[in-house]
Image (tube, rainbow, N blue to C red):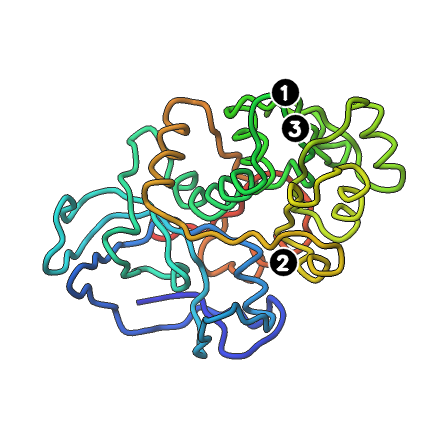
Amino acid sequence: MRAAAFASIGGPEVMKVMEFPDPQAGPGQVRIRVKAAGVQHYDCAVRSGWKPQGVTIELPQIPGNEFAGIVDQVGDGVTGVSVGSEVLGFSMFKCYAEYVVVSADQIVSKPASMSWEAAGGLTGNGQGAYIALKAIGVGPEDTILIHGAAGSLGSYAVQLAKEWRAKKIIGTASESNHEYVRSLGAIPVTYGEGLVERVRAIAPEGVDAAFDTAGADAVRASVELVKDRNRICTFVAYDLIEELGLRLVRGERSAARLAELVELHASGKLRTHIRRTFPLEQVEAAHRMIETRHGRGKIVLTLGY
């Protein structure tokens, strides 16, 4: 099979299309012919040399941890799914490939109304936003600040906070993305110098919780605005967590949670804005684009269609 992988640690230029043996589904597993694979900052961090705790990187490494495609092989003991089923799911790595093998409990059915691009890009950021907001207890009567609200992770967080009836949602974004953030259900505010004062003007009653997808400056602003540091979560500035006395939020992805997100998507309560799609051969360009940390919505690799 063809897959995008890196044989050495480095920048986007180390991403190359290579050939690998076709993986085979074992007991309890399914093989998926991948149609779309989402691109995440996690993938770029691993490519750049970050080693997630308890994870082994084997060069050449195929990154990618979310996908959508068609089941084409079913292992022994698997029930409830058959060859030809359209699904989306997750894996730690190996999704930037024509085929991926995962446990049968890591996939859910793809609705016919959901595009391949949206399905391929939902799992990682959708579940990440869900885990973060549940960890900081977002719910009715809360005022929440979401940094990087126009990005894929931030966009899902805004929509979930709205679904969970947060009283006021404030989203930081560049001015060019304010209308988009407003369309998601948040009050947009420009990031940068003076952010704390601008947020206080919007929420004089105070901010109850904050979720950061932008970086150090956003986290420090959140500490000034939110009284309870247990209600501040960052998925970017991990190096500040201990220094500022914040909680480290981790969570395991699950098919049950993914199915809930898919249902919200199918009912129109959760939408995915596709920033751009790239064919597998342009994976380097996809990594360069996401690493700018600008723009709105999701970047997705497409395969075979």
State the residue position of label 2.
288
Query: Horizontal placement of 68 versus 295: left or right?
Result: left
How crowded pointer 3 is (Cα within 10 Å; few <14, some 14-19, many 20+) is rated as many
Query: Horizontal placement of 105 versus 167: left or right?
Result: left
How crowded pointer 2 is (Cα within 10 Å; few <14, some 14-19, many 20+) is rated as some
Quarter the N terminus occupies? bottom left
State the residue position of label 3.
181
For marks 2 and 3, give the CA distance: 23 Å
Up-down relation of residue 294 to residue 72 (above or below):
above
State the residue position of label 1.
167
Up-down relation of residue 225 to residue 56 (above or below):
above
Q: Nearer the viewer, residue 148 or 240?
A: 240
Query: Horizontal placement of 162 versus 303: left or right?
Result: right
Q: Position of residue 101 (x, y in %)?
A: 27, 61
Q: Position of residue 224 (x, y in %)?
A: 82, 41
Q: Position of residue 19 (x, y in %)?
A: 35, 73
At horizontal 46% and vertical 75% (from top left) the residue drawn is 57
Please tell me which of labels 1 and 2 falls first in the chain.
1
Q: Secondary structure at mark 3?
A: helix
Q: Secondary structure at mark 1?
A: loop
At horizontal 43% and vertical 22% (from top left) the residue drawn is 268
Q: Nearer the viewer, residue 198 or 288?
A: 198
How crowded pointer 1 is (Cα within 10 Å; few <14, some 14-19, many 20+) is rated as some
Could you tell me the amino acid type at mark 2? Arg
